[in-house]
Image (tube, rainbow, N blue to C red):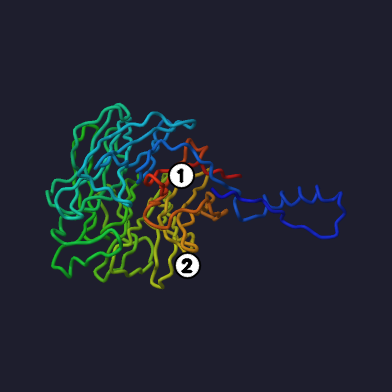
Amino acid sequence: MEQMTRTAAWRRAGRARDLWPALRMLAVIGCLLFSTVVLADLRALPSPAGAGSSASTWTSLSDGRAVLSWLERVGRGHAFRFAVFDGEAFDAVGEVARGDDWFANWADKPRLFELGNGAWLAHWLVKSGPGTYAYDVVMAVSTDQGRSWSEPFSPHDDGTQTEHGFVSYFPLSTDRAGVVWLDGRETADGGHGHDGHAHDHHQHGQGDMTLRAAVVDAVGRVSEPALLDERVCDCCQTASVMTDSGPVVIYRGRSADEVRDIRIVRRLDQGWTDPVRIHADDWRIHACPVNGPALIASGQELIAAWFTLGADGIPRVELARSQDTGASFAHRATLGSERALGRVDLAWWQGGFVVSWLDQVDGAARLQLARFDQDAGLKDQRELTTLDAGRISGFPKLVNLKGERLLVTWTEPGAEGPQVQVAEIIVQP
C-alpha cells in the first residue's frame, strides 16, 4: 500500500532556526484548510478468502454489518462463499453453493441481497450448454443468514442456451425484491465476447441482447416478468436502486447505429417507462466495453457514475446527479480524463458520497477515490493504491459500514493464484 507523505504548504529560506516549529505547524494547518488532496490511506484487513478467490463484492445488511462474497476455486470447479464483517472481524466463512459447471467470469459477479424481512437472496451463473456464453442465472434463498439455502431456481424460464447475467437488485416489499438481468434469449446462436470483441447480432441475422426484470419473494417464487429494453449492450453491468417514486435501473444501451450510452428505465404507477439516456456521450463502438455504471439513491436523489470514451475517443468517468428520482439528470463532474480504465463504484459517505475508479498510468492501474459534498461538489481526490491493469484486479467495490467506515475489496495476483483483498479507506476530515 502506498503511504501519502504530508508536505509543508510553504517554507521560506533564511528564517531563524527557532521559527521552524511554528512554521511547520502553520504548514500543516494550511494543508488541512486549503489543500484539494484528501489525506487518505488504505489499511489492509485480513481477507477471509483463500487462494484462487476472485469476483468479490459487498452487501450491506440492515443491522449495519456488511457481507463480503466471492468465488473461490474448489477442485475443478468453484464455490460461492461469503463472510460477515461486524466492524471488528469477519465471521466464519459460509458457502452458498458449489459446482463444476459454473460460468466464472471476472466481470459478471455472483452476489447476495437482503430482503426487508432479513432473508437473503443469492445468485450465481451456471452453464446451460456447450456454447462459451450459454449460461443461466441461478438463485437461492436463505432465511437464516446463510446457514442453509433453498433449492436453486432461475428468474427466467426461456430455456435458451444463451447468455443470462449481470444481475442487479432493488427492494420492493418486506418479502420481495426486483431482479434485473441481461437476457440473450433473442440472440439464439448469435455470439459475442466479454473481452471487448462482440459480434453484431443484426449482421448475423440474430436478435439482440435484452434487459429484463422479475420479482422474487422470500420463498423463491418468481412473478411479474418484464421486458425493460429490447436492445442493450451485451456484457456491461446493470445497476438498480429504489427511490421515493419507485425502482430505477441504469445500464449501457445499444442503438441501431452502435451508440452505447447509459440509459435509464423507471417503474412508476403506470408501469415501466421507455428507456432514455441520462447523458449524451455519443460513444459509438462495435464491441462491448465490459464496463457498466454504478448508481446510488436516497429518497429523491440519485448519483450515477460510468465510464465512456464519448464521441471524441477520450477515456473518462462521468458523474451525474438527479434530484427528481431519475426524471432528469445534471452532469456534475468528469474524472480521470485521458487515462481512465473505468470499473466505477459509488457509496454514500458523511453527508456526501465517494466514487472510485481505475486510471491507467505507466501500464499499471491506479485505484482512485474522489469525495463529493452534499451538493455533488468535488471536495478532493487521491490515489489509493496500484493494482494489476488486467482483468485479475476485477471491479473494486466499496461499502459504507454504519456510516463510520469505508471499505474496499479487489483481487490481486499471487503465487498460488488470485486472492481477494480487503482494506479500510482512512479518510481524514
Residue 85 coordinates in the image, percent (x, y): 43, 33
Q: Amino acid at mark 1?
A: Val
Residue at image location 60% in from the left, 44% down from the top: 428
- The answer to whether 422 appears left or right of 52 in the picture is right
Q: Are marks 1 and 2 in contact (CB under 8 Å)?
A: no
Task: State the SS at label 1.
Answer: strand
Measured in 3D between alpha carbons, the distance from the residue under mark 1 to the one under mark 2, in whole angstroms, is 25 Å
Q: Is residue 187 visible?
A: yes
Near mark 2 (Cα within 10 A), the count class, few <14, some 14-19 or many ≥20, is some
Q: Amino acid at mark 2?
A: Glu
Residue at image location 34% in from the left, 41% down from the top: 70
Quadrant where the C terminus is found in the figure? top right
- Residue lying at the far left in this picture: please name it: 159
Residue at image location 44% in from the left, 57% down from the top: 320
Q: Is residue 154 above or below residue 250?
A: above
Residue 5 coordinates in the image, percent (x, y): 64, 51
Say which residue label 2 marks. 338
Counting residues from the N terminus, which is met first, the one under dot 1 or under dot 2? 2
Residue 129 coordinates in the image, percent (x, y): 14, 50
Badge number at residue 408: 1
Q: Is residue 244 visible?
A: no
